[in-house]
Structure formats: C-alpha cells, structure tokens
Amino acid sequence: MANKRALSGAEAIAYAMRQINPDVVALYPITPQTPIAETFAKHVSDGLVDTELILTESEHSSLSAVIGASASGVRAMTATASQGLLYMYEMLSVASGLRLPIVMAVANRAISSPINIHCDHSDSMSALDQGWLQFYCESSQEAYEMMLFALRLSESVNLPSMVCIDGFITSHCVEPVVVFEDNLVKKFIGEYTPKHYLLDTKNPITVGPLVPPHSYFEVRSEMFNAFNDVKSNFNFISKEFKKIFKKDIKIFEDYFASDADIVLIVLSSSASTSKQVIDKFREQGKKVGLLRPILLRPFFYEEYFKILKNAKQIIVLERAEGPGSFSPIYKDLVVSFYGSKFSPQIYSYVFGLGGRDLYEKDIEDLISSFIKKKIPKERYIGLK
Amino acid sequence: MNKKSNNLLGGALQGGTSIENKTGSWRTERPVWDKKKCIQCMKCYIFCPENCILAIKKNKSIQRGETDLDFCKGCGICAEVCPTKAITMQKENDFDISFLPQTSKKAINPKLSKSKKFNKINKLKKK
C-alpha cells in the first residue's frame, strides 16, 4: 500500500504539496528553502499539479499573493526561511488576522547579522506570537506528514500554519520516506469550502476593512480564542489521520519522559542525536528522558505539566536565544509549572546557533554533570 | 459592526456597509444651492465624488434635485465646478441641525433591516 521513497526534507514537503494540489503557490527562493521551491516548480512544469505558480520578486510579495489567493477562497501555500520570513513579517499578522488557513513550510536558518545560511531556530521563533500554528519536524517523514496534517488543522480553525524543518540538516538530507497514496491523501484533505470568500459574487464581502476601536479588540480576540479550539480539533483530525494512514500524530514526542528524573527538551533534528544519548543513559539505569515538542503554538500547558510534573530537573535545549531574556520554550515551561505544588528545576541552554553542530558528547557531558549535581553555569553549549 | 452582528471571520464585512456610515457628520462646510441661479447643466451631479447630488426626472427631462446631506462631506467640488456660482459653501455652524432638506428628513428608518435600508436609499436616489 504505502511505498518508500528516498527524499530530502525539502522534496518530502514538495511531494506533500503535489498531493495537496493547492490552487495557488507563490514562491521566492532563499537558501535552504530553495529545493522546496525548485522541486515544486518542477512538479508544475511536469503538469503533475494544476497549481497557479506565482514567482514573485520578494517574500513580502509571495505571502501577500498567497493571502490574496486564500481570501479569494482557494487553497494557497508558500515556503521560506530566515530573512525571507522576516521580510514576510508584516504580512504574518495579516494572514492570521484575516483568518486564512495558509500553510507555509519554513526551512529554519540563522538570521543576520552576521549573515549565515545554516540552521538555527531564530527565524521562526521570532514569529511565535503572530497568530500562526507552528510545527517543528524531526525528519523528512514527519515533515511530509505534518504538511498534510497542518493543512487540515489550519482549515478547521481558520488559522495559518508554519511547518518548520531544520535548514540543511533536514531540508537537504536524503532519508527514506514512506509516502501515502494520492487517493488516500485526497480523501484525508477533502475539498476546501470556506464559509465566506472574496470571489463569491452572490454574497459580496469586504475583506480587511478599517476596524475602529469599537470593534478591533473583538475581531482580534476572536482570533486569540480560535487557538482554544485547536486542542479538540487536533484530537479529531489526528484520529482521522490514524484511521486513513495508520499513523499517530502527537503534540509532542515522549521518549522515556514520563518516568524520568532528568528530562531533556529539544526541538527538531537535534532530538535524534539526543535520543542516542538517552539510550546510553537508560542502559546504565539512569532515569533520563526526552520530550520533543512538535506543535509549539498553541502551547499545551496542561499536557506538558501532566507529563513533566514528576521530573526533578528539566533541561531545555534551544536553538534560539531571547536576548536580554530567556529562550521561548523555557519561558512557556516555567509558566506551566507556576503556582503548582510540583516545581521541577528548569534550566535553559542555548546551542547550535548559525549551524554549529551539537554532538553526542555535548549532550552526554551536560546530562552527566546534572547527574553529578554540578549544574553548568555556562548557558551556551559549544561556545568557543 | 459590533460583536453580535459580525458573524464573518477576520473582521470581514458584508457588502453595502457604507450606507450605514453617514459621512455627513464629517462636514465643516455645507453646499447651499440657489435654485434661481441654477441653469440645470448637471455638472455638479457628474462631479460629486459621493453621488450626493440627486437627479430627478421631471417632464421627461432630468433635473438637479436636493443634496443628500447625510453623506455630503463638504468637499466643495460642486461649488468649484458650478458655472453660475449657484452653489456656495457656507460654514456648517451657521445652520440649525434640526433643519435638514427633504431628502434627509425621510431618509432612513433605523428600525429597518440592512437590505430594506439599502433598497430605500436606492429608491430615493432613483427619484
């Protein structure tokens, strides 16, 4: 039934986009997102999709084009990275404010300055609170599945989604990917029927009018409240996903986390390296576990609390820094424990900015110093 | 548009909402039309950017009607283009607010629904 392909993360995303067959895709290439754009443009040239491909002159224009297309009542997608995402920043809140279910792939890359093309999460982390759902994928396989899942979830709550993969590490690395059959994907995503849309000439509407103080708060709060519906819709759609594709979709991956004393929290591809280390410690009988958040926005405070409440120490390893503050996931985790009788010690560490590799030894050293109760004071791992 | 009436996502609005937004309150100067000087050239009707100058059918010809002061913003274009200076702009403060020309008096019953209001305005404009 299902068949295996050798695909890079970018190709896997383009493969999912081919199966979704969106009506409009607007793209502007930026490393390391380029292979997504390239591969999808090839699908268009080969006539594999009916998509109207718009090659814009900037990322600001590509998201603007996608917003216009989505408001007109069709499925629209794009992809970007790093400075491209920051160039789109103005339009991010427009997409979420207009409640358009756009799905955008992001190949995480460091932000300037200094200029660097390699992986870290500073780009998408800077857009955490713009009203977008955010998925962080560990592998090509997960990126492929999340593209399909994010589309359904987005359309069910009318909020846009970012599907993030690690630039180069996942986007360019070829892995075996089990792809689903086209007709099953069609069955899962179904037809897109928005409640109201711009090109519905029988029911004309105005999209994006001036909203004065007497209503702005209400319109925005409707968008904030839509995040409350994500949980129930997530459960419903993941059940459907399992029924059709026989695969589980979770808000986080629990790798020996629920009974561990020391829990490592890490996103995306670095979790694969960390799992090797966790295995080593488990073989020695040490109670060490890993929790890998997948859906980061909305943040499921209760779920994280439930699974981590018995942990003694939580180490949050992040590929992004909050200058003058702390890294984003650390702050969310601290909030989820505030005021409860469970109070694990939570530590924030930053690694791998600008694509600096995180080795097994780094993680091993970090965890063993926690086991020895010598907590490292240096927040930056791998800093020379 | 308040929370109850807005059932569209993302602050989108149904069509025809400008009927409800009476821009006449923005006005600081009001166009006053002197019928005696008017030669019925209809230039003001053509140039009015808000369609506030109504045209009336009279004896198989079209004549200038009253200005719709509910929506007239007082831009003064009609006074500018009038070849006989039949339209003059006068300070809004000089007028008694309770006195409004006929079109505004019968204009809109707030109890009517949106579509009825819309039809009524259209009828008024067609007159």
Image (spheres, rainbow, N blue to C red):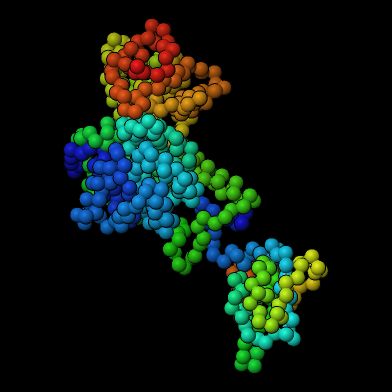
The residue positioned 48% from the left and 17% from the top of the image is: A344
Residue B26 seen from this side: yes
Choose between A364 and A254: the one closer to the eye: A364
Residue at image coords 74%, 86%: B36
Residue pictured at 48% horizontal, 48% vertical? A94
Q: Quadrant of residue A372?
A: top left
Regarding residue A137, the answer to whether it shows in the image is no
Residue A115 appears left or right of B12: left
Above/below status of A47 relative to A171:
below
Q: How far across and down, in percent of the image, does residue A295 sit?
A: 40, 35
Q: Position of residue A117 (x, y in %)?
A: 31, 34
Q: As rendered, which of A38 and A185 lies closer to the eye? A: A38
Give the side of residue A38 with respect to residue A309, left or right. Answer: left
Q: Residue at x 79, y 65 (%)?
A: B93
Where residue A145 sits in the image (x, y, percent)?
30, 40
Q: Residue furthest bottom?
A: B59
Picture quadrant where residue A12 is located? top left
